[in-house]
């Protein structure tokens, strides 16, 4: 039999105002197992905690019930108090008589009656509580960063700076991500390459960082502190450690007509290529879909010209298994496809382009070497129309776009407009917008500069249709403020396409058992208080995989994620939640029902020897729970046909006794 | 006469991560709902064994409501999907046994939906009150 102490808290007048705490303490005194019952103004205060400690020692208590606020508030506090008095912290139960009683019920008799019943339920549960000891699991002091854009780069650098090893897995042949494609960055107009490429070099030269480029994570097993990831290194048909990045092969390859994805298909590259001059690692990659040698076996020019002898046509995909303590997701974003937006004639005219394509056109390293020329005829455009919110802030029933605001488009469109007017003052620049949203530091000043100093025409309204006619584009739009239709003959139309999470994010979330919202953005553990952690322990989020982000925010978040990772890796051992499933091996019949529903793969089967009444030994297959992996949801306890599976801390008999106490 | 005035007895199972927090939020915002609702905290809605619900009815509960995270938002990834299926089966069986549909319910309440929690409880209690006392599964041996 337990010796239970009941502590009823007044919470000032928060509880005592609607619940007669004296009567509750008195009524609970006669419950089975209760040997001590008292009430106090603030149980959570130092004085209140001292009362509890003293009572535990004086009355030799084996269980404690605190009738107070929500366990989400002070369960940890009271567990610590009990532990300080030498009681197992898991022998403490809370009856929530504030949030779920005094605050929602108005009159004293009702509140008191309910508080007594809730107290009785908690006492009934504590009577069946058993002392629990949390297990410990070791921590592998290495981190995996998935994605090598600015988010991944910054996270890796910060983690490595603290002395931990980091691996970056990037699916493209080079790290750098979207930022490498950008020309200038708002609001300061720094050249993106000038601030990004030194960081890429830092990554390459950092002894603690390894880069797996042209690679993907194909499987993740394990749990916080002990992940095992399988990384698929795709065959690039070039020996990475031998290639010097001289680029001769990329000049001599006879296959010249491969659309260059780095320039979004606006020019061509060879079948063997280095994405851009500052690529890290600077190693050539052979595109197997276009290489004549790999497809037909006849060519081999690159192997002939390579002085280092780095070309290897027989290379195969390689699978590497590595252990990590923490994983950072930094898979980033992509602009959405414009295929569904027929009204903007994106697929009909080469002169309707997306903002990222415009970025490449303006970039000195881009397909036009930084000259603003129309993709169709190479002429300089004199009238440019920018359309904002293409696919952003769409209504939910409209399947074409996204409901959310893509956040970065207002600023980059202002940047494009400003840079265009700066370089080519003879061009007319129109921007159509729904709202201009510029809430960052120095952002609104930047936008106003575009309007006031650079004379960009901002028009509130949406473009209804773009019609290619001759070599021009007829843009029909509405001006909402003047309440009239406008027609503009444009030479170039630039669409600020909405951004969406990378396609690789969804399968990755499944592998990591991390959750996603309806838009496939990763969800954070808490939107305000745990913004860089995913709900899955040990998985952290960095950059636009979590929601639209600009570069300053991404870098800030990357640093935050890195600090969380460092905090985790600095520990030698992790304490596990002791409220986990456990199976009664005598009752278990090894049917696998529990293992089938376990979302964490925490249940495995072991062969166990059992001594039978006739003194023979029987070997049976029984379930075994990995306590470090089990998160304690209790799904397995319900499917178990023999009732062998139970959840510690929320055991069948405990919940049942609560039901009984309530229904008395 | 007295039977009509008897207040119903409602057991609510709330998952720790969403609905229990939603109930706390209803408290924080002082949103009233009837005191007949007594909440039992479970780690996940999928922890609720159909046995618990049968036990509640056996012991004289007039209604049982189960609250969990919204589909897709389960803290344990998939727990509430199991709940949804299990309860669909259980409630249809209970219906067959004479426990009216309005006495049982599964509701998704997120940690942010204090107002929804209070509204759900108000509505549920109203429906159960309208049905009157539940005698169908009550085991008189359990009563002292």
Image (tube, rainbow, N blue to C red):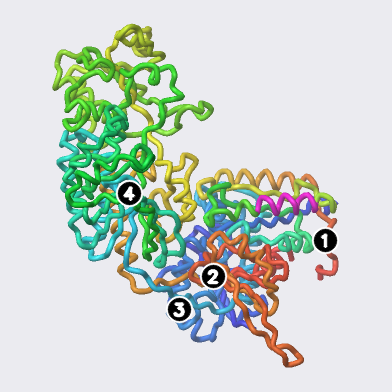
Question: Looking at the image, is mark 3 or mark 4 earlier in the sequence?
Answer: 3
Where is mark 4, residue-wise? A313
Question: Looking at the image, is mark 4 or mark 2 earlier in the sequence?
Answer: 4
Where is mark 2, residue-wise? A579
Where is mark 1, residue-wise? B138
Query: With A267 as the anchor, is A193 left or right in this view?
Result: left
Q: Quadrant of residue A634?
A: bottom right
The picture places residue A340, in percent across and down from the top left corner, at 46, 24
In the rendered view, tell whether residue B113 sits above or below residue A267. Answer: below
Where is mark 3, residue-wise? A83
Marks 3 and 4, how far apart in space? 65 Å
Nearest to viewer (mark 1 / mark 4): 4
The picture places residue A520, in percent across and down from the top left corner, at 46, 42
Do tags 4 and 2 sit on the same chain? yes
Do tags 3 and 1 sit on the same chain? no
The picture places residue A167, in percent across and down from the top left corner, at 30, 58
**A13 part of magenta stretch:** no
Q: Residue at x 34, y 13 (%)?
A: A481
Marks 4 and 2, how far apart in space? 54 Å
């Amino acid at each position: 039999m337990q010796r239970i102490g009941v502590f009823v808290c007044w919470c000032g007048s928060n509880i005592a105002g609607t619940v007669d705490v004296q009567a509750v303490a008195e009524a609970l005194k006669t419950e089975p197992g209760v040997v001590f019952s008292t009430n106090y103004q603030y149980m959570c205060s130092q004085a209140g905690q001292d009362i509890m400690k003293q009572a535990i020692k004086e009355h030799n208590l084996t269980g404690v019930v605190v009738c107070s606020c929500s366990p989400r508030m002070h369960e940890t506090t009271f567990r610590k108090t009990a532990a300080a008095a030498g009681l197992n912290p898991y022998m403490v139960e809370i009856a929530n008589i504030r949030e779920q009683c005094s605050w929602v019920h108005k009159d004293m008799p009702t509140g008191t009656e309910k508080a007594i019943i809730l107290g009785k339920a908690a006492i009934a549960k504590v009577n069946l509580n058993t002392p629990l000891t949390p297990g410990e699991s070791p921590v592998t002091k290495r981190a995996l960063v998935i994605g090598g854009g600015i988010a991944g780069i910054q996270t890796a650098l910060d983690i490595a700076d603290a002395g931990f090893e980091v691996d970056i897995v990037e699916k493209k042949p080079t790290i750098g991500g979207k930022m490498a494609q950008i020309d200038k960055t708002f609001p300061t107009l720094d050249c993106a390459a000038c601030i990004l490429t030194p960081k890429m070099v830092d990554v390459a030269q950092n002894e603690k960082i390894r880069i797996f480029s042209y690679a993907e994570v194909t499987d993740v097993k394990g749990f916080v502190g002990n992940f095992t990831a399988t990384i698929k290194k795709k065959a690039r048909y070039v020996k990475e450690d031998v290639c010097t990045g001289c680029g001769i092969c990329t000049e001599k390859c006879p296959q010249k007509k491969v659309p260059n994805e780095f320039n979004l298909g606006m020019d061509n590259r060879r079948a063997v290529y280095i994405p851009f001059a500052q690529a890290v690692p600077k190693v050539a990659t052979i595109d197997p879909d276009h290489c004549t040698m790999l497809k037909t076996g006849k060519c081999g020019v690159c192997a002939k010209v390579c002085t280092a002898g780095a070309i290897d046509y027989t290379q195969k995909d390689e699978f590497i298994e590595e252990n990590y303590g923490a994983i950072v997701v930094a898979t980033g974003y992509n602009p959405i496809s414009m295929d569904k937006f027929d009204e903007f004639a994106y697929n009909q005219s080469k002169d309707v382009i997306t903002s990222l394509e415009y970025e490449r056109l303006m970039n000195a390293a881009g397909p036009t070497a930084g000259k603003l020329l129309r993709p169709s005829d190479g002429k300089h455009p004199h009238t440019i129309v920018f359309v904002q919110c293409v696919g952003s802030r769409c209504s939910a029933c409209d399947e074409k776009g996204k409901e959310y605001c893509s956040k970065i488009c207002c600023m980059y469109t202002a940047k494009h407009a400003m840079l265009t007017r700066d370089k080519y003052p003879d061009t007319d620049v129109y921007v159509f917008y729904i709202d201009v949203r510029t809430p960052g530091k120095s952002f609104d000043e930047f936008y106003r500069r575009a309007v006031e100093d650079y004379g960009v025409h901002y028009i509130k309204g949406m473009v209804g249709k773009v019609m290619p006619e001759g070599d021009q584009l007829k843009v029909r739009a509405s001006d909402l403020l003047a309440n009239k239709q406008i027609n503009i003959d444009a030479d170039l139309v630039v669409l600020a396409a909405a951004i969406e999470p990378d396609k690789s994010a969804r399968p990755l979330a499944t592998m990591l058992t991390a959750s996603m919202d309806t838009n496939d953005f990763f969800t954070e553990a808490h939107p305000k208080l745990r913004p860089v952690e995913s709900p899955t322990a040990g998985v952290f989020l960095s950059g636009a995989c979590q929601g639209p982000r600009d570069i300053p925010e991404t870098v800030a978040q990357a640093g935050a994620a890195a600090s969380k990772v460092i905090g985790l890796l600095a520990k030698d051992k992790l304490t596990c939640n002791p409220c986990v499933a456990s199976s009664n091996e005598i009752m278990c019949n090894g049917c696998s029902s529990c293992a089938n529903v376990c979302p964490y793969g925490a249940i495995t089967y072991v062969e166990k020897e059992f001594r039978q009444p006739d003194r023979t030994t029987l070997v049976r297959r029984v379930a075994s729970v990995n306590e470090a992996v089990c998160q304690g949801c209790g799904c397995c306890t319900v499917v178990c046909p023999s009732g062998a599976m139970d959840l510690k801390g929320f055991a069948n008999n405990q919940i049942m006794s609560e039901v009984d106490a309530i229904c008395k | 006469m007295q039977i009509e005035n008897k207040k119903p007895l409602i057991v609510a199972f709330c998952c720790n991560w969403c609905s229990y927090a939603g109930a706390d939020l209803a408290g924080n915002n002082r949103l009233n709902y009837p005191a007949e609702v007594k909440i039992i905290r479970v780690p996940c809605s999928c922890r609720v064994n159909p046995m618990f619900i049968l036990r509640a009815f056996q012991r004289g509960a007039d209604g049982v409501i189960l609250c969990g995270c919204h589909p897709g938002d389960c803290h344990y990834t998939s727990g509430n999907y199991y709940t949804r299926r299990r309860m669909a089966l259980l409630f249809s069986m209970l219906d067959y046994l004479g426990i009216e549909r309005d006495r049982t319910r599964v509701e998704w309440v997120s940690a942010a939906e204090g107002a929804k929690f209070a509204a759900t409880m108000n509505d549920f209690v109203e429906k159960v009150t309208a049905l009157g006392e539940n005698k169908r599964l009550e085991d008189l041996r359990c009563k002292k």
